[in-house]
C-alpha cells in the first residue's frame, strides 16, 4: 500500500475531513481509495476504484497492531462463502504496512438506509420478501458451521445493477464457529457472558449466555418487527451506564409477553418467535418451517413475488426530483454511483469495440 492511512482522527476535525478522501492511497497495488462510507463491528470501510478498469469496490481496513485483529478471520469466512448467493465476493486480503486490508464487492444501501427512505416502515409485502432472503442467508452460514452474532439492518444490504433485488449479508467480525466438523462436537452452553452484538436486536439469552443458531434466528424475528413498526419496545431506554442500559433492555425483552410484542401483526410473527425461543441450545432449527410460515402468509395475502420492494416505486418518484436537485442522503449517493457504474461500463464496451474494429482493419 502506498502511504498507508493513519488511525481515525477525532470526529469533526479537519483531519477527519481529509481522511474521508484518500485519493493518494493505493491498496493491493490496483485499487485507489476514494472516500469513507462507514464502519463495521471493527475497522473502517472505504469506497475504492480499480486503477485499470475503474470498477468500484469496497475496502475494509483494520489496524494490524491491535491486540486481537478480527479481519483475518472475517476474510477466512468470506473465503468459505465464496461463490454463494447473497454474500459479497472477496477480491483480496493481505497486510500492507500497519493495516489489514480486505477488498470486497461494492454493494448498495443497507436495509436501515432503505427503512429511512421509506418513512421508517416497510409494507407487509416488502417485509415478507426480505424475511425469506434473510433467513436463507442465515441458514447458509449455519450450514458452514458459523453463527453471525450481530444480526441487524446495517448488516443486510441490497445489491447493485442486476443484483439490486438480492439481499446480501455482511460483517462477520463477530461470527463464531459453533460446530467442529472434525470432532463432530457442538460448542458447550455456558452463562455469565457479556453481550456480543447489538443490544437492540440481540436475543434475550445473548445478554447473558453463549449464543447459538437459535439466537441468530430470534434476532431476525426482531428485525421483522422493526421493519413493520419502525421501532422496538426497548428502544430509547435511558441508563447511567452502557451495562445498566443492556440490563434494562434484557429485562424488557424477557418480561414482555410475545402476544403483546407481536400484537396487531399476523399470528405467524408470534409463531416464529415462539419457535425460536423454544429451541434448545444445540438443537438443529427447522429453517424450512420458519420460511414456510412467511411464505404461506405471503400467498394468503395474494402478494406477487415480483421483487417490487417499497423503495422501488418511491425511487421512481425520487428520480424525477433528483434530476432537478441532487439528494445527498446515503441511499441516493448509492443510486448516483450505480448510474456512474453503468455509464462507465457502457464507455468501456464502446472503447473495446473500437479497438476490435481497429484491429480488424
Image (cartoon, grey):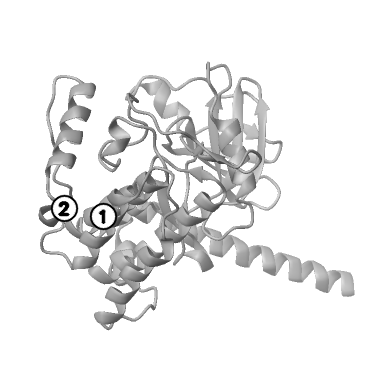
Pointer 2 local density, CA inside 10 Å: few below 14, some 14–19, many at least 20: some
Q: Quadrant of residue 316?
A: bottom left
Q: Quadrant of the C terminus?
A: bottom right
Element at label 2: helix
Residue plotted at (71% across, 49% down):
52
Label of residue 258 in the image: 2
Residue plotted at (40% across, 28% down):
17
Q: Which residue is mark 1?
A: 273
User: Residue 158, how many percent across, how many down?
Assistant: 43, 58
User: Residue 164, how many percent across, how many down?
Assistant: 46, 64
Pointer 1 local density, CA inside 10 Å: few below 14, some 14–19, many at least 20: many
Q: Quadrant of residue 324?
A: bottom left
Label of residue 237 in the image: none
Q: Quadrant of the N terminus?
A: top right
Nearer-the-camera pick, 326 or 259: 259
Circles 2, 1 touching at the beta carbon (< 8 Å): yes
Nearer-the-camera pick, 172 or 64: 172
Q: Is residue 328 visible?
A: no
Specify the farthest residue to the bottom: 302
Alpha carbon distance from label 2 to label 1: 8 Å
Left or right, 164 with respect to 347, comes to left
Residue plotted at (24% across, 69% down):
124
Amino acid at each position: 500500500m502506498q502511504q498507508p492511512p493513519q488511525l481515525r482522527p477525532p470526529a469533526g476535525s479537519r483531519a477527519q475531513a481529509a481522511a474521508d478522501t484518500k485519493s493518494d492511497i493505493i491498496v493491493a497495488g490496483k485499487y485507489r481509495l476514494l472516500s469513507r462510507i462507514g464502519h463495521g463491528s471493527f475497522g473502517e470501510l472505504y469506497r475504492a476504484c480499480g486503477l485499470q478498469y475503474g470498477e468500484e469496490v469496497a475496502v475494509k481496513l483494520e489496524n494490524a497492531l491491535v491486540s486481537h485483529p478480527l479481519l483475518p478471520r472475517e476474510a477466512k469466512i468470506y473465503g468459505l462463502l465464496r461463490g454463494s448467493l447473497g454474500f459479497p465476493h472477496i477480491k483480496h486480503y493481505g497486510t500492507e504496512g500497519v493495516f489489514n486490508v480486505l477488498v470486497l464487492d461494492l454493494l448498495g444501501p443497507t436495509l436501515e438506509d432503505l427503512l429511512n427512505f421509506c418513512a421508517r416502515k416497510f409494507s407487509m409485502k416488502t417485509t415478507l420478501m426480505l424475511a425469506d432472503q434473510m433467513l436463507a442467508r442465515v441458514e447458509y452460514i449455519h450450514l458452514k458451521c458459523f453463527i453471525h452474532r450481530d444480526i441487524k439492518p446495517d448488516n443486510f444490504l441490497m445489491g447493485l445493477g442486476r443484483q439490486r433485488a438480492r439481499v446480501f449479508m455482511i460483517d462477520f467480525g463477530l461470527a463464531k464457529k459453533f460446530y467442529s466438523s472434525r470432532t463432530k462436537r457442538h460448542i458447550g452452553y455456558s452463562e455469565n457472558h457479556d453481550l456480543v452484538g447489538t443490544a437492540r436486536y440481540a436475543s434475550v439469552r445473548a445478554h447473558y449466555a453463549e449464543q447459538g443458531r437459535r439466537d441468530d434466528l430470534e434476532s431476525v424475528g426482531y428485525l421483522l418487527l422493526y421493519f413493520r413498526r419502525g421501532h422496538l419496545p426497548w428502544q430509547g431506554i435511558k441508563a447511567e451506564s452502557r451495562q445498566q442500559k443492556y440490563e434494562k433492555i434484557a429485562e424488557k425483552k424477557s418480561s414482555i409477553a410475545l402476544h403483546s410484542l407481536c400484537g396487531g401483526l399476523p399470528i405467524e410473527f408470534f409463531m416464529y418467535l415462539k419457535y425460536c425461543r423454544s429451541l434448545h441450545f444445540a438443537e438443529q432449527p427447522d429453517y424450512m418451517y420458519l420460511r414456510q410460515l412467511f411464505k404461506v402468509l405471503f400467498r394468503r395475502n395474494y402478494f406477487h413475488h415480483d421483487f417490487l420492494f417499497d423503495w422501488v416505486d418511491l425511487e421512481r418518484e425520487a428520480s424525477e426530483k433528483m434530476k432537478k436537485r441532487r439528494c445527498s442522503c446515503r441511499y441516493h449517493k448509492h443510486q448516483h454511483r450505480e448510474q456512474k457504474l453503468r455509464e462507465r461500463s457502457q464507455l468501456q464496451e464502446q472503447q473495446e469495440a473500437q479497438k476490435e474494429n481497429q484491429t480488424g482493419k
